[in-house]
Amino acid sequence: IVLCGIQEAEVCNQIILVEEVLARLCQNSFPLSQLQSRPLPDGVDPLRLEIYLSDQDFQTALEMTREEYERLPAWKQVNLKKAKGLF
């Protein structure tokens, strides 16, 4: 009976760990400083770092709104991200 209790506790701990990992992988916003450093957080697409910024960090980092950024041609978006350390 004690062995079952220990096994159940281990399973509960594993479930908690899985939930923590899923929460980290599902995180959709990161501070600018975290996206400019390496290694990147797990699950972050290194080619689209700008999508993980909060609206405020986005405007601070790229000096424009998301809407203004989206209207730029792709090559200008890439050049801007490179200049701002988000590529």
Image (tube, rainbow, N blue to C red):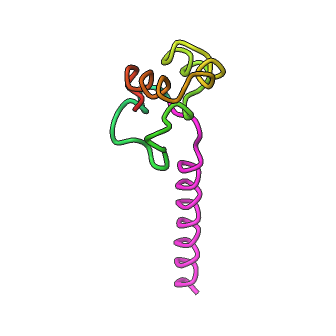
Q: Please name the residue shown 54% across and 50% down the image.
A: 25
In the current view of this chain or complex, which residue is farthest to the left?
Answer: 38
The verdict on residue 36 being magenta is no
Task: Give the answer, above or below, for where 16 lies relative to 47.
Answer: below
Screen quadrant of the N terminus: bottom right
Residue 28 magenta-highlighted = yes
Residue at left 59%, top 26%?
54
Q: How many marks?
A: 0
Up-down: is 20 above or below 1? above
Q: Nearer the viewer, residue 20 or 34?
A: 34
Q: Position of residue 78 (x, y in %)?
A: 45, 28
Q: Position of residue 81 (x, y in %)?
A: 44, 25
Q: Residue at x 55, y 34 (%)?
A: 52
Snapshot quadrant of residue 33 = top left
Left or right: residue 54 compared with residue 37: right
Question: Residue 80: where, in percent of width, then height?
Answer: 44, 21
Q: Is residue 86 left or right of residue 57?
A: left
- In the image, 56 versus 85, the foreground residue is 85
Residue nearer the viewer, 71 or 29: 71
Based on the displayed image, in which of its 4 quarters is residue 46 positioned? top left
Query: In this picture, which residue range is highlighted in magenta?
Result: 1-30
The residue under the point 52% across, 72% down is: 10
Q: Position of residue 7 (x, y in %)?
A: 53, 79
Q: Is residue 4 above or below residue 30?
A: below
Please state, as top left, top right, bottom left or bottom right, where the C terminus lies in the image. top left
Q: Main secondary structure of the magenta part?
A: helix
Check the image and name the residue furthest to the right.
67
